[in-house]
């Protein structure tokens, strides 16, 4: 008897094609829509009902069973609250990383296996083999960066069938299978923020914030911010600093409620030759200090050659870079690669 695979179906084209490919390969497929976030935000109606209907429509087209898992409470606690807490502390956290760690490859996996699944599958652009994680074939869509916190066990129970395809091929397959989502646009931005932008979302969660000074590298006040937590390292837009060359955020002090900027692109505050990471996680074995690796300091950032040093606390890591990188941001993830294999990573401090 064929293995039973529970496919996470978001209502998008990638997860729809994932389900279609696996059914075509002879697996027994159950589509699952994860109800994670249903709250409307100011000026934006949450699209969850539309996405749910699209996922259900594709399941009917494919002739597969379809379920809904309600993870809204857990999603709020482990993803949304995590992000809001991070911003309150002056960090720039990545909720998509936490969603994969806590929801898709933990909660969903556990629920599916309990429900009788042999495996789960998602529409991520990444590849796995024998419990190891690798980059997706399509470099422009590769999502391995967001998956670095999952475990060997999760990978051993997961299928990532579109990881070996280009995005154009996925669209072509959607049309070939005649899927209702074949022409649906890709979702943009953070999963639950949608089109309104992170600042508007934080305002809806935390309310307006105290204003404070924007200070340049010479100590001069050059403007006023509307809440230090809204600003991130390297940010250029939304500073409300007039005239001359553009300014970039180099840092902030949450206690003093100050934001620091520069108009010098070579300012040392914008460039780093090393990183310190905490909450370090390795998918398989811990890498060795003697070897050279590569690091990606944010999604879509180029890989930079590096070496590693573990300190006395094994959940912390020093990363020494062979070239400087720009706008290293506390709270973001830095992911360590060995060529196309994802080893793990941690949170920038």
Image (cartoon, helix red, strand yellow):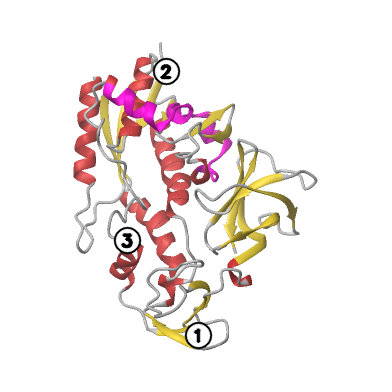
Is 339 above or below relative to 326?
above
Read off the magenta span: 147-175
Question: Could you say which quadrant of the image residue 11 lies in?
Answer: top left
Task: Give the mark toward the camera: 2 or 1.
Answer: 1
Between discs 2 and 1, the one toward the N terminus: 2
Instruction: Please tell me which residue is depicted at 38% across the width and 84% down the height of the picture.
Output: 211
* Residue 115 appearing in the image: no
Residue at the outermost front position: 244
Task: Give x and y (percent) for residue 303.
Answer: 61, 47
Q: Which residue is mark 1?
A: 256
Label 2 SS: loop
Residue 128 horizontal/vertical position (percent): 54, 30
Left or right of 80 in this view: 309: right
Residue 163 position, x and y percent, is 47, 30
* Whether residue 159 is situated above or below residue 72 in the rendered picture: above
Q: Which numbered disc, 2 or 3, marks the residue that appears first in the sequence?
A: 2
Which disc number belongs to residue 197? 3
Q: Are the residues at dot 2 and dot 1 in contact (C-beta closer than 8 Å)? A: no
Location of mark 2 (residue):
3
Q: CA distance from mark 2 to mark 1?
A: 58 Å
Residue 180 screen position, x and y as percent: 21, 29
Helix, strand, or loop for circle 3? Answer: loop
What residue is shown at x 60% (from left), y 72% (from top)?
Answer: 267
Q: At 50% from the left edge and 50% from the top edge, which residue is drawn?
A: 299
């Amino acid at each position: 008897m064929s293995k039973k695979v529970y496919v996470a179906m978001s209502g998008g084209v990638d997860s729809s094609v994932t389900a279609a490919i696996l059914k075509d390969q002879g697996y027994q497929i159950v589509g699952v829509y994860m109800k994670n976030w249903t709250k409307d935000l100011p000026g934006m109606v949450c699209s969850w009902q539309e996405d749910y209907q699209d996922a259900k429509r594709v399941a009917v087209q494919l002739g597969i069973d379809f379920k809904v898992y309600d993870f809204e409470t857990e999603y709020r606690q482990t993803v949304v609250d995590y992000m809001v807490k991070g911003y309150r502390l002056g960090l720039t956290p990545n909720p998509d990383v936490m969603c994969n760690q806590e929801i898709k490859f933990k909660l969903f996996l556990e629920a599916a296996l309990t429900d009788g699944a042999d495996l789960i599958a998602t529409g991520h652009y990444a590849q796995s083999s024998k419990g190891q994680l690798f980059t997706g074939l399509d470099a422009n869509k590769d999502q391995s960066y967001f998956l670095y916190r999952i475990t060997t066990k999760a990978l051993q129970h997961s299928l990532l069938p579109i990881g070996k395809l280009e995005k154009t091929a996925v669209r072509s397959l959607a049309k070939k299978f005649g899927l209702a989502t074949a022409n649906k646009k890709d979702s943009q931005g953070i999963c639950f923020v949608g089109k309104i932008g992170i600042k508007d979302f934080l305002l809806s969660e935390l309310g307006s914030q105290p204003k404070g000074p924007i200070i340049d590298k010479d100590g001069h006040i050059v403007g006023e911010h509307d809440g230090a937590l809204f600003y991130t390292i390297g940010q250029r837009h939304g500073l409300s600093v007039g005239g001359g060359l553009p300014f970039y955020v180099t840092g902030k002090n949450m206690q003093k409620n100050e934001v620091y900027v520069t108009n010098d692109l070579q300012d040392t505050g914008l460039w780093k030759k090393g990183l310190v990471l905490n909450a370090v996680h390795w998918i398989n074995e811990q890498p060795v200090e003697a070897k050279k690796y590569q690091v990606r300091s944010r999604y879509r950032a180029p890989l930079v050659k590096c070496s590693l040093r573990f300190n006395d606390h094994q959940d912390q890591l020093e990363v020494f870079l062979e070239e400087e990188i720009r706008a290293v941001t506390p709270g973001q993830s830095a992911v360590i690669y060995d060529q196309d294999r994802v080893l793990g990573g941690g949170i920038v401090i």
